[in-house]
Image (cartoon, grey):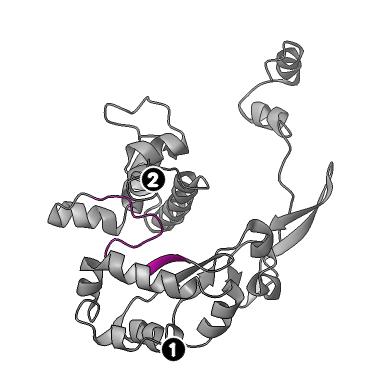
């Protein structure tokens, strides 16, 4: 399997590629950031992560092919094409309709209201993605039921056309109370929502605690290390973490031996500070 920046063919086949470079070159950075502001990178190396997940699926499919054909498969999995696939609806809007994308901050380009709103003491993400949810928002949350019948907002297409007016109305209402007030109001009525949590709040989230989403692993150098647990369960059970992450160069000698280097060769490389 080849896992590189741009793939094994084409004019960029030998070009080096980091996640953030691919984010820029494959369109992700162009659509990330506030409207009218500069492009931004995503907060984690999402292109690297996606490529690893695509590679995992490709390897599983390749192993299945081996079982069926008794022949191996050469897999070319690269950051650039993975990020093209990751453009999802943005790619479809361009390839099918010719629509160039732009930055919308936390907002959705074609669904309104679907973005972060300021409260008195923090921020709340609200996604009223259909007419039923929008009516619940106007009636149960904003207590302005007339908005659902206002021709400027009565359909999603109308709300997109009048985005700024509607967002100003919702923002003005939510700014009147603390975030906890709105969390209580939103909970259980059927509108997707969530507070903007920092990392400490994220790992203290009741769902993360209830599902034991972190694990402690014994590390030979660092002692007990707390890590994110594997995010998938099988028949209701989470697979155990069998070993801690390696430290830098922990397996260098083993890998070099697999590549045909002798103990003496490795010793000379270490003496020369090559490895």
Percent of width and height locating residue 42: 47, 47
Q: Give how far across and how far down residue 62 sits, in percent.
A: 41, 52
The residue where tag 1 is placed is 140
- How dense is the environment of label 1, judged by Cα within 10 Å: few (below 14), some, or many (20 and up)? some
Height in image: 166 above or below 54?
below
Q: Quadrant of residue 145?
A: bottom left
Which numbered disc covers residue 73? 2
Q: Earlier in the sequence, mark 1 or mark 2?
A: 2
For the point 33% across and 63% down, the residue is 108
Q: Main secondary structure of the magenta part?
A: loop
Q: Nearer the viewer, mark 1 or mark 2?
A: 1
Instruction: Determine crowd level at label 2: few under 14, some 14-19, many 20+ residues with C-alpha closer than 10 A.
Output: some
Q: Is residue 94 left or right of residue 215?
A: left
- Count of marks overlaid on the render: 2
Q: Quadrant of the N terminus?
A: top left
Residues in magenta, as a range: 101-117
Closer to us: 242 or 161: 161
Q: Residue at x 27, y 30 (%)?
A: 10
């Amino acid at each position: 399997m080849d896992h590189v920046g741009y793939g094994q063919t084409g004019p960029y086949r030998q070009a080096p590629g980091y996640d953030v470079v691919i984010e820029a070159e494959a369109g992700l950075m162009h659509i990330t950031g506030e409207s009218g502001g500069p492009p931004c990178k995503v907060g984690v190396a999402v292109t690297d992560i996606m490529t690893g997940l695509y590679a995992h699926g490709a390897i599983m499919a390749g192993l299945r092919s081996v079982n069926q054909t008794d022949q191996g498969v050469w897999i070319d999995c690269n950051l650039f094409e993975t990020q093209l696939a990751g453009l999802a609806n943005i790619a479809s809007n361009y390839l099918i309709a010719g629509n160039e994308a732009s930055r919308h901050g936390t907002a959705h380009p074609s669904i309104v209201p679907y973005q972060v709103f300021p409260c008195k003491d923090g921020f709340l993400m609200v996604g009223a993605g259909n007419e039923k949810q929008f009516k619940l928002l106007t009636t149960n949350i904003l207590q302005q039921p007339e908005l659902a019948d206002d021709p400027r907002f009565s359909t999603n297409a109308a709300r997109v056309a009048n985005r700024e007016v509607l967002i100003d109305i919702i923002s003005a209402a939510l700014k009147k109370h603390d975030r906890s007030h709105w969390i209580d109001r939103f909970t259980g009525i059927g509108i997707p929502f969530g507070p903007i949590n920092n990392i400490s709040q994220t790992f203290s989230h009741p769902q993360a605690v209830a599902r034991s989403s972190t694990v402690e692993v014994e590390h030979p150098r660092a002692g007990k290390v707390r890590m994110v647990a594997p995010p998938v369960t099988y028949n209701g059970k989470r697979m155990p973490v069998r070993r801690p992450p390696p430290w830098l160069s922990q397996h260098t000698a083993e890998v070099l031996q697999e590549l045909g280097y002798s103990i003496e060769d490795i010793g000379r490389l270490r003496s020369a500070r090559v490895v």
